[in-house]
Image (cartoon, helix red, strand yellow):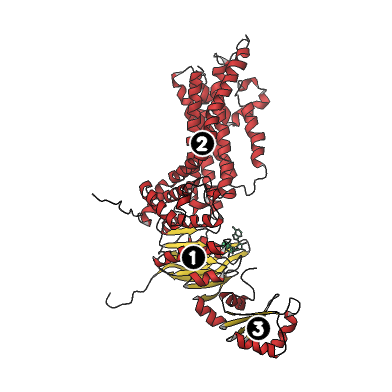
Amino acid sequence: MTETQPRLQAHSPEASAAKARRWGSFYFMEHMLRSMRAYAVTIVVTSVGNPLLYLFSMGVGLASIVDRSPSAHFAGVGYLAYAAPALLVSSAVMTCANEMMFPVMDGFKWRRVYYGPHVTPLVPGQLAAGHVMAVGVRLLVQCLVFFLIMLAFGAVRSPASWLVVPIGVLAGMAFGTPLMAYAARIEKENFQFSMIQRFIVMPLFLFSGTFYPLETMPPAMQWIGWISPLWHGNQLGRLATIGLMEPVWLVAVHVLYLVALGLFGIGWARRNYARRMAA
Amino acid sequence: MAGARTVRPPVISARNLVKTYGDVNAVDGISFEVPAGESFGLLGPNGAGKSTTMRMIGGVTQRTSGELSIMGLDPEKQGPEVRAHLGVVPQQDNLDEELRVRDNLIVYGRYFGLSHSYLAQRADELLDFAQLAEKAKARVDSLSGGMKRRLTIARSLINDPRILLLDEPTTGLDPQARHVLWDRLFRLKEQGVTLVLTTHYMDEAEQLCDRLIVVDKGKIMAEGSPSALIREHSSREVLEVRFGTDRNAAVAPQLDGVGERIEVLPDRVLVYTDNGEASLEQIRARQLHPITSLVRRASLEDVFLRLTGRSLID
Ligand SMILES: Nc1ncnc2c1ncn2[C@@H]1O[C@H](COP(=O)(O)OP(=O)(O)OP(=O)(O)O)[C@@H](O)[C@H]1O
Ligand SMILES: [Mg+2]
């Protein structure tokens, strides 16, 4: 039994490099998650507060009016149950949009957080991947909390309804990762982000079949839903929580579209990170 | 190896390094070798290409042409393997201000795949080394400039690197903070760590470097130990005389023959000489009365002035 703690040794540079090649993305994720702890209170408050606020106003306010109207029919369920999964997906998309804009600029430009790990065994593509994974963890927690609150409000109808949680994460990423790739190319932030918020995120929120079915919009505007990851996510969410009936091909389109957009976004982001950081 | 002197193989070897940005030749054909354990400096003014060279060594900037080998590896092809050997102190601090002081070290160490148990111990050692132990739990944005710099240096040592790259380690620090840093760097040097540092402070280069290259506009102007460079390119002493900003240039021709060489700067005239006091006597004998005079030892600043006709710090 030794009295004093033995002096531990750093492993060899070769071992460092091998580990970094393999786990580098996770190391950066770990870093991002630690920094999120600095604004953990905000994260918790919004994750719990948003669903409470949304579901309360929908369930007690809007739903009580809508459900009284004899012509209203929302997939045969009450309005709260109809809107709730779409609100979960929307909140995931909005959170992801934020996490893929400002923190990316912070990494490259404002506080240059990416340039610390840049001179370690990590490579830029791993920073992109680690960033995505950390945001994924945040989305997962947020969607799970939202789902639990939906349960409490009695807004789910199906045993498979928990699937809305991964669906929310997927929809968030389908929107967020291409945005991240775009943000990685911005040299100077001249209101691009607030433009995106106002002219892309908000319209998508309003016109992606969140509050009413896409078909109730004029046909000339329905294309917005078709290109919007939010609509595809909303429909999948409803499929999970209220058993919304849709043809199998359409369900496949929803899933494939979201997966394709997410993969495209990650690939493009990795490339942009590598380019920008090799200059 | 019977009786053979151990020849130290270079840990860094660069041949004809070139880096072009658009039509700017940031680095324009630089070659050098650094043996293990040496303290090697790149001295040059703003825009000389020092940082660009440092970034190429770490493999984080692609070189336009030339050959580079760090521990026998090409940093462009084996970036992670090369960087695993290095500790890097960038010119601009990039600590994570959202994390606390100690957490900055831990998080950084994770990038080298080091275990939490090792890092807990190492972080405390390094905080002691950087004299930041009391600040372990402080937020980074509450630190002074000198403390941040020391933390950045501590961070670069988390993986016990045998090669440390320091890009302007003390720029922007007050004299006391610089001396603390120099002291820390001396200790590393004593432990056999190879130091590669850039600076545009000649005193820093003289203090820390065994050998250096003087770089200007991407090219090497001279190479050698600080004392050899001074011997080669300057006299032993320098007499600085001031006659007033408007008169310096007019008086200069009358100093002909005093010392070995005269250099006229806007605010003063430098007389290169082996005996400053004697030269001053000569000047007084010519009935020229400088407002102020100062005799000092020649420095790398004089070497740089000689080689480029310009001052190091503009
Ligand atoms: N990313 C870049 N894009 C374009 N030009 C660059 C870039 N980085 C450096 N340069 C140019 O290359 C030249 C050398 O720059 P570098 O930063 O290597 O100089 P330096 O010796 O480190 O200067 P300083 O003492 O100011 O830090 C400069 O002319 C600079 O403008
Ligand atoms: Mg520089």
Q: Are marks 2 and 3 on the same chain?
A: no
Q: Which residue is mark 2?
A: A40
Please give left or right for residue A198 compared with residue A119 in the image.
right
Residue B68 in sight from this viewpoint: no
On the image, the x and y values in percent for residue A160 come to 44, 21
Chain of the residue where label 1 is placed in the rendered structure? B
Please give left or right for residue A147 compared with residue A22 in the image.
right
- Evaluate if marks 2 and 3 touch, with contact meaning CB atoms under 8 Å apart: no
Picture quadrant where residue A174 is located: top right
In the depicted view, which residue is nearer to us: A76 or B225? B225
Q: Which residue is mark 3?
A: B262
Q: In terms of image quarters, where does ligand 1 lie? A: bottom right
Q: Nearer the viewer, mark 1 or mark 2?
A: 1
Q: Which residue is mark 1?
A: B182
Amino acid type of disc 2? Ala
- Name the element at disc 1: helix
Amino acid type of disc 3? Ile
Q: CA distance from mark 2 to mark 3?
A: 65 Å
